[in-house]
Image (spheres, rainbow, N blue to C red):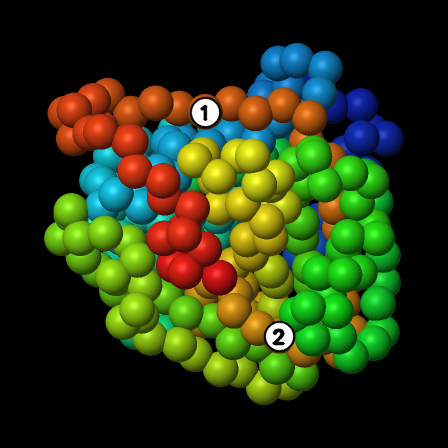
Amino acid sequence: MVSDLFAALPDSLRQSLALRAQATGESPALILEQMLRRGLAVKADSPSLYVSAPVNALVEGIYEENTQISEILEHGDFGLGTFNQLDGEMVVLDGKVFQLKSDGQAYAVEPTVHTPFACVTFFTPNSEELIEQELDFKQLTELLERMIPSLNMIYAIRIEGHFSYVKTRSVPRQESYRPLVEVAREQPEFEFEQIEGVMAGYWTPSFMESLTVPGYHLHFLTADHQHGGHLLACKTRSIRIGIQQLSRLEVGLPMTLDYLTAEFTRDLNQDLQEAEH
Ligand code: ZN
């Protein structure tokens, strides 16, 4: 079927595809698949952020939803999240999903695995910048703030390159109903020095605090796909920053009994700030 598809392409497109494959080291079939995914996902005129469930549910300890990874990938090829029973941090890069568990290792994820919370988008940066400078996390966010036109929009952020220091954490697997803020107090942290890798995540405005983790939320994966986690601190050395503005938001509302019968009346902002930053 794939060979039929290649045969149907004009020569010039086949050549461009071969060149891209050579440059990225990916197979032409994978590149074609990713491009088709993107093309078919563009339903409206502007790119959107897809949130599989409001983050409030997670903060209240609802760690199980029936959303499969395969469904998440229908909404985006880039992003972050977690897994059922809060079993590690999720990072999605170029349509591949990784599970960054509390043992510090990264694992490839099957499409049938479930997630209670994921944020994804089809990533195509509007602006890119190369930075050859040592910036700590605070300085990096100040730089990002100069790159993004308005704090009231959503931005997908991909930062790739060499870091002289990265600190992450990964949530340990949990039973449901233990508030996220308690779990977050016992999560293992990991430090990396002189490491190549990618950070993937978002800026979302503070008024979205019941839907997503507000502010900057980034997950880190090492270039060898072996380690990573939720980003806590870093020092950059030589990086490329890609930013995509997202002007639409799509939110999934889970159909599980836990979700349907939960009472989201508590103000969860403080818990979320402590658990995620
Ligand atoms: Zn996170």
The picture quadrant where one finds residue 40 is top right
Element at label 1: strand
State the image coordinates of residue 169 (x, y, percent, origin top left): 41, 69
Up the image or down, 167 lies above or below 60; here it is: below
Judged left or right of residue 220, residue 248 is: right
State the image coordinates of residue 58 (x, y, percent, origin top left): 30, 43
The tag on residue 177 is none
Judge by depth and name the residue closer to the eye, 59 or 1: 59
Ligand 1 within 8 Å, label 1 CB: no
Element at label 2: strand
Q: Which amino acid does label 2 sit on?
A: Cys
Residue 69 visible in this rendered orientation of the protein:
no
Judge by depth and name the residue closer to the eye, 152 or 218: 152
In this figure, which residue is indicated by the disc labeled 1?
251
Judged left or right of residue 258, residue 223 is: right
* Label 1 environment density (alpha carbons within 10 Å; few <14, some 14–19, many ≥20): some
State the image coordinates of residue 60 (x, y, percent, origin top left): 25, 43
Residue, x 29% and y 31% (percent of image)? Answer: 265
The picture quadrant where one finds residue 30 is top right
Sequence-wise, which precedes: disc 2 or disc 1? 2
Up the image or down, 72 lies above or below 28; here it is: above
In this figure, which residue is indicated by the disc labeled 2?
234
Q: Which amino acid does label 1 sit on?
A: Val
Residue 168 visible in this rendered orientation of the protein:
yes
Residue, x 47% and y 71% (percent of image)? Answer: 168
Residue, x 79% and y 45% (percent of image)? Answer: 148
Judge by depth and name the residue closer to the eye, 175 or 74: 175
State the image coordinates of residue 17 (x, y, percent, origin top left): 75, 39
Residue, x 53% and y 34% (percent of image)? Answer: 208
Judged left or right of residue 26, residue 68 is: left
Up the image or down, 173 lies above or below 268; here it is: below
Q: How far apart are marks 2 and 1 (CA)?
A: 30 Å
